Image (tube, helix red, strand yellow):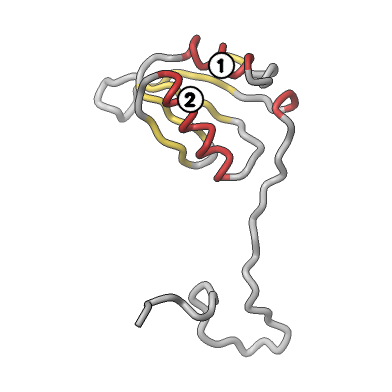
Amino acid sequence: MSKKKLYNTNGIVYSTNSDFNYSEEKNSRETLPPNEQLLKIKLDKKHRGGKVVTIIEGFAMGESAIGSMSKQLKTFCGSGGSAKNNEIIIQGDHKEKIWQWLIKNGYIKSKKI
């Protein structure tokens, strides 16, 4: 027998509120077009054992879009990384390379910090 959840109640077992709705609230983020997004590119090495990472922050898009963009950037830079907390972390100093990629893909308001 499969272990699928029959109902998606987000851990809610019982509610005494007569107006309560078990439907899931979606936290959909408003996605702006690339030319209106102000992205910041910065280097960081705090709490990383002295290793440098490039961080891109300021996204106005959903988590899935950030994840796919992260994959494209990691492939372009030939490096590892992750997408967490509405920011993309790329291992290594790729500030100039990422900035050029963002400009090429329409993120013209990107700036290096």
Residue 111: give x, y in percent of width and height: 61, 15
Q: How far, Cα to Cα, is label 2 from label 1? A: 8 Å
Q: Position of residue 94 (x, y in %)?
A: 43, 14
In the displayed structure, 39 sits above or below 31; it is above
Q: Residue at x 75, y 26 (%)?
A: 36
Would residue 108 appear left or right of 90 to someone viewing this image? right
User: Which SS class for mark 2?
Assistant: helix
Q: Amino acid at mark 2?
A: Leu
The residue carrying pointer 1 sits among few (fewer than 14), some (14 to 19) or many (20 or more) residues within 10 Å by Cα, namely some
User: What's the residue at 70%, 27% (across, down)?
Assistant: 34
Left-right relation of 43 to 79: right
Q: Which residue is mark 1?
A: 101
38 and 98: which is toward the camera: 98
Amino acid type assigned to the residue bearing label 1 in the image: Trp
Quadrant the C terminus occupies: top right
- Label 1: state its secondary structure: helix
> Mark 2 or mark 1: which comes first in sequence?
2
Where in the figure is residue 108, as x and y percent of width and height?
A: 69, 17
Front residue of 31/71: it is 71
- The answer to whether mark 2 and mark 1 are in CB contact below 8 A is yes
Residue denoted by label 2: 73
